Image: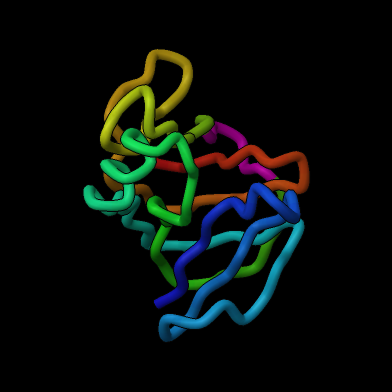
Amino acid sequence: MTDVYRNLTRQVWSVREGGRVVAHLHELALRDVRLVVQPGGRAACLRTGQRSAQAVARGTRTDFAGVPEGAVEIGYSPWMAPYFTFRPGFRKALACRVAVFTSNGTAWALL
């Protein structure tokens, strides 16, 4: 399994496998994705105002072919909700078939 999260310092996507960061990429894609938020990490963020790698998209890496037609934007903000959301509308997002992470920092999902 591969975990992907936005590295706010480097402005890239960090790729973690086996608990270790193995790459920093500008764009990539995952399939069979679960969207996971660590409650303790979110609580610490709310308490201190310090962001951390508390939310990840977890899935299997696949070929990046751009944002597919019909994809919806997904995101996470610890101040908005304790889970990822589909945007617009901020509906709860727990999983998707494919997630695409783009070079401009947005993430897109095919349900």
User: In the picture shown, does residue 5 fall above or below 89?
Assistant: below
Given residues 99 and 3, the one toward you in this image is 3
User: In the orientation shown, which residue stands out farthest toward the bottom?
Assistant: 18
Question: Tag count in the figure?
Answer: 0
Here the colouring is rainbow
Q: Name the main secondary structure of what is drawn in magenta.
A: loop
In which quadrant will I find the C terminus? top left
Whether residue 26 sits left or right of residue 87 in the image: it is right
**Figure quadrant of residue 7:** bottom right
User: In the picture shown, does residue 84 fall above or below 87?
Assistant: below
Query: Residue 77 location, x and y as percent?
Result: 43, 32
Q: Residue at x 39, y 14 (%)?
A: 89
Q: Residue at x 42, y 85 (%)?
A: 18
Query: Residue 48 location, x and y as percent?
Result: 39, 38
Residue range in magenta is 67-71
Whether residue 103 sits left or right of residue 42 in the image: it is right
Q: Residue at x 41, y 66 (%)?
A: 59
Q: Is residue 68 magenta?
A: yes
Whether residue 90 sits left or right of residue 7 in the image: it is left
Query: Residue 74 location, x and y as percent?
Result: 48, 35
Query: Residue 46 location, x and y as percent?
Result: 34, 34
Q: Is residue 91 magenta?
A: no
In which quadrant will I find the N terminus? bottom left
**Figure quadrant of residue 68:** top right
User: In the orientation shown, which residue stands out farthest toward the front?
Assistant: 48
Given residues 108 and 4, the one toward you in this image is 4
User: In the orientation shown, which residue stands out farthest toward the top?
Assistant: 89
Q: Residue at x 57, y 42 (%)?
A: 107
